Amino acid sequence: MTAIVPTRILLGVTGGIAAYKSADLVRRLGERGAEVQVVMTAGARQFVTPLTFQALSGRPVRSDLWDESAEAAMGHIELARWASHVLVAPASADFMARLAHGLADDLLTTLCLATDAPIAVAPAMNRLMWANPATQANVATLRERGVAVLGPGVGGQACGETGPGRMLEPEELIASLWSGPRGGALAGRKVLITAGPTRERIDPVRFITNRSSGKMGFAVAEAARAAGAEVVLVSGPVNLATPAGVRRVDVESAEQMLESVREQLPGTDVFVAAAAVSDYRPVQAAAEKIKKTSDSIVLALSRTTDILATVAGGSPRPFVVGFAAETQNVERNALAKLDAKRLDMIAANQVGDGLAFDCEDNALTVYWPGGKRELARAPKRRLADELVAVIAERFAARDVEAADPARSAPGSVVSR
């Protein structure tokens, strides 16, 4: 579906190699009928010339707060009032730090402070810069003030490293900002999702894990965002790009995932546990690589904390959705899990022998106390849309059922 974009977009471009993508972004926005005014920082002009943006936007590029011809009539205030939306792409770590601290030492930061239009930033930087606590604190501050943080994506970077920090592609930015429904089935709701595998360390070079790719959980995150929700995605180690508009938290072990879920849980309306969390971890990880000194080795394991049961057993608690990946007796095992953990809903599927893992499609049977629904095999993204629709439907029905306990209650499995 073609995105409907605002008519007047002030596009800020800061210093970074990703600035080359901004030229394509201007072109795509123009194709959708938007007027684009580009404002460049001094650093941005080291990567792309203003003439490039002027040719694509049809408007002279602004870059200097002390431009006498433009500022004679308070041009920066005029620009701030002109914009229906402000998008900074790429947004460098330096720019976000200055914006978070309320500095107005160049034209772009001044405009951001002087406008009442919604502001969005698309981070682009080295993975270590993105992970730095100072950057993360600035990002948190911007979010608290209502600035939309789009991305970053995960993948190869100009520095040769791989990880989170890539600027989202132009189409992803457009879709994230303007094509999502404003009145979707989960509009105004916070959805917390876990995805991917976890890794439990044996020694510095070995770990216990599973075959989960994270694709189903990421698809659910994207579908929930498309349904209007604020989405937080807690992910184990995967090689997947962050869905546009979704806030991602990366973890490795089951313990780290539990800690992150607890941190993100306040204010959550719906919790979807799509991650394949390790059930066991080594009792003690070796400090050094274990050497091959015998024909066999005994590895002592202990249970990890059940994240799904922990959330479902809390008070107050969100609407809790679990997943059951089974190799046999799918329905019996799924219903037992639904009942034992007192879930609101569970999505079950058959795995193994070419099913679910390492596949682009999947099929689900969704159970809740008092009912079930079959979701036929489909690409995971399409299947996620169907699942989110069922979640939204049952979430809305929960208030009705709460008024009449005889109809249904979590943990009370009735005939289907």
Image: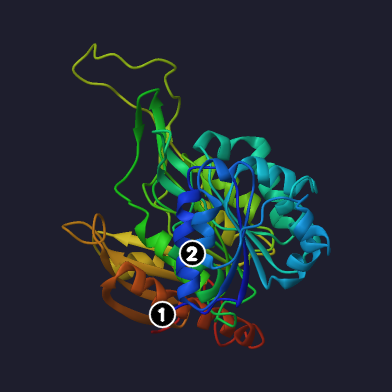
The kind of residue on which mark 2 rests is Leu
Mark 1 element type: loop
| Foreground: disc 2 or disc 1 | 2
The kind of residue on which mark 1 rests is Met
Quarter assignment of residue 10: bottom right
Quarter assignment of residue 267: bottom right
**Distance from the alpha carbon under mark 2 to that under mark 1:** 24 Å
Q: Is residue 375 left or right of residue 107?
A: left
> Does 388 appear above or below 45?
below
Pointer 2: residues within 10 angstroms few (<14), some, or many (20+)? some
Sequence-first tag of 2 and 1: 1
Pointer 1: residues within 10 angstroms few (<14), some, or many (20+)? few
Percent of width and height locating residue 217:
41, 60
Which residue ends up furthest to the front in the rendered image?
69
Percent of width and height locating residue 282:
41, 30
Percent of width and height locating residue 93:
62, 41
Report the front residue among 216 and 62.
62
Quarter assignment of residue 120: bottom right
Residue under numbered circle 1: 1
Which residue ends up furthest to the top in the rendered image?
293
Q: Residue at x 60, y 41 (%)?
A: 43
Report the front residue among 166 and 269.
166
Q: Is residue 224 visible?
A: no
Which residue ends up furthest to the right in the rendered image?
73
Mark 2 element type: helix
Q: Residue at x 18, y 17 (%)?
A: 295
Q: Is residue 297 left or right of residue 196?
A: left
Q: Residue at x 56, y 87 (%)?
A: 407
Q: Is residue 291 left or right of residue 284?
A: left
| Quadrant housing the N terminus | bottom left
Residue under numbered circle 2: 56
| Quadrant housing the C terminus | bottom left
